[in-house]
Every structure is written in structure tokens, then in C-alpha cells.
Image: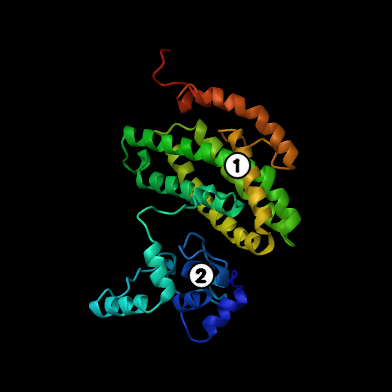
Amino acid sequence: MGMPTRDQVLAALDGGTDYAAAAARLGVHPGLAYLIATGFPADGSDVVTAEEQRRPGVLPGSSQHLANPAVHAPDAGGVVHAWLRRRAQGDAQMAAAARARTATPGPQNDPGSTTDVVTVLTRQHDAATSLVKQLDAIPGRSRGGTPAQASERESIVDMIGKALAAHETSEEEHLWPRVRELLPDGDRWADGGLQQEQEATETLSALSRADPQTEEFDDLVEELMPRLHRHVAYEDRLFLQLRRAVPDEERARMGERILAAQRDAPTRPHPDAPREPGPAVAAAARSAAPVDRARDATGRPADREGRPDPGAPG
């Protein structure tokens, strides 16, 4: 079964069923069914306005349970086991499979080997989201955090900056140009995505210059986190469009180009670098990347961004 449409999900809900039952009928995760029907992620990472709350399919309360539904184990009672044994003994194919079974596992597909652009970028979103959660869990100086905790926050921000520098540069070079070409409303998607990436890059650049022991740094972190959440949710909605409109082979080629670009991408935010067209992005990246890596080699964020080292002699 292919990816259900918004109308199919809403039709299933109109029958009086809930998202869990509708998702099971359509063969998708409940959280994905909610995203398809409403355009909003079920984990609540997107802000819903009062007007959007009236959109068909939007739940009046929390939808978090759809993002992380409870797992129900099947009945493992003796009656079930006995039925399964009788079923297996009476099925010639199952009996043959049992005889052929060995303790040696068959070949496994490495889930990390796919180059589907949606899968590649979604994994990177997950990694960035994990870092943001770690960042949020550590109090900054303005919330009573210690100097050591402020240093931890700086390190996490540094990791986020490195990850997003490569991620966004590769998107600007290879994702957004193809989105413009492949989707009917591709210009709208690309313009929105590029604007969000520019804003995040500017915030990360400001963070790289701010002292992590100050309130300014904490304020910038508070500005960065919702921006990243909104951007991930935005691209999650885009990825639904790509899965529907772009053949598997083309998505795989896009992912290969994304990964190749990231191997030689900058590692620091560059808010003044071009965001498009793709060739201009690539040229700027090739120029900036060696400088970034030279700064990375010093091992200290302060040195890398030109801030004075507070421990250095005057």
C-alpha cells in the first residue's frame, strides 16, 4: 500500500474511528496519519494557531500519544501457543521453512545504507533534535547553571553548528533547487526553507561570538531551539510531498549528492554565504571549508570564532 492521501485519512476518521484505528487500516503510523491529515507533527513541535485549530482532523487536546503510541504485546497464553503449533504443523510451507531454518542469520539490510534523501535528512534531523534536547536539559548561567554547565552548553551549541552547517549547505546545493523543479509549489517550499535556514544560521553565528557565561548566550539559545523545531517540522511536511511526487530512484540520487556535498562542507555557520543557486553555494562552501577545518583544529570554540581566550595571558 502506498502513502495514503489527506482525503483518505480524513475519510477514515469520518467513519467515527480514531487516529490509531485509521492508521492501522491505512498501514501507517498514527503520528504519520495525523501529519498527513493536518499538516502538523503529532509530537507538538509546531505551534498551532486558533484558526489552524479548526482545521479538519486537528485534535482539540494533545496529540503526543499519536507520536508515541503504547505498544501492546500479543497474548502469549498457552491457548495461543497451542493454536500456533497446530497451525504450523498443518501448513506444508511453514513446516518446510522450519526444517530449513538454521542458527545462521541471513543477510541483513543495513538501514543506514539507504541514500533516499528523505531518510538521510530525517536521520540528521533526529540527531540535531537530540542535541537540542540535551542543550535544553542543562541550565544556563541565567537559570542558575554553573560555569561547567555553561561550558557544556557551548560544546553542544558547537556540535549543533557543525552539524547544521553541513546539513544546510548540502540542502542549499542539492535539495532546494530540485524541490523547485520537482514540486508544483516548489518555489514556495524552497523560499520558506531557505528563509528558515538563514535565520538559524544567523543565530548560530551570533552564538559563536557570544560568551557562554552570559545572559546573551542563554537568550540566543532560547531563540535557536524553537527555530530548529519549526524547521524540522517544516521539512517533515516537505518530505511527505517528496515521497509522493518523486520516484525512489531520484530520491536516492538526491541523497547521494547530499552526502557527497556534506563530506566537504563548511563546519561553521556562514550567514553571509549565498543560499542559492546551487553552483554559487558549492563554490562558497569549497572556499570556506578549509578555513573552518583549520579553526576546528585549534580545539577551542573561542579561538575558532575569533573570541579572545579568557585563559590567555594579557
202 shown above or below 59: above
At 51% across and 26% down in the image, what residue appears? 296
Give the Cα separation between the discs numbered 2 and 1.
Answer: 28 Å
Amino acid type at image mark 2: Val
Q: Residues within 10 Å of mark 2 (few under 14, many from 20)?
A: some
* Closer to the camera in the image, 217 or 290: 290
132 to the left or right of 56 = left
- Residue 179, compared with residue 57, is above or below; it is above
Q: Give me the residue at 59% from left, 69% from top.
A: 3
Tell which residue pokes out farthest to the bottom in this image. 15
Determine the image quadrant of residue 181. bottom right
Amino acid type of disc 1?
Leu
Q: Residue furthest left?
A: 78
Query: Which residue position is annotated with label 2?
Result: 28
Q: Residue at x 40, y 77 (%)?
A: 91
Residue visible at 60% across and 33% down?
A: 266
Colouring scheme applied when the structure was drawn = rainbow
Q: Which mark is residue 259?
A: 1
Q: Secondary structure at mark 1?
A: helix
User: Which x, y percent locates residue 89?
Assistant: 34, 76
Q: Please name whichever residue, 154 or 285, is drawn nearer the observer in this view of the structure.
A: 285
Residue 183, by quadrant, is bottom right
Going from N to C along the chain, the mark reached first, 2 or 1, is 2
Give percent across and percent down for residue 239.
60, 58
Image coords of residue 157 (percent x, y): 46, 38
**Is residue 260 at least partly visible in the picture?**
yes
- Residue 175's x, y, as percent? 67, 49
Disc 2 is placed on an element classified as loop
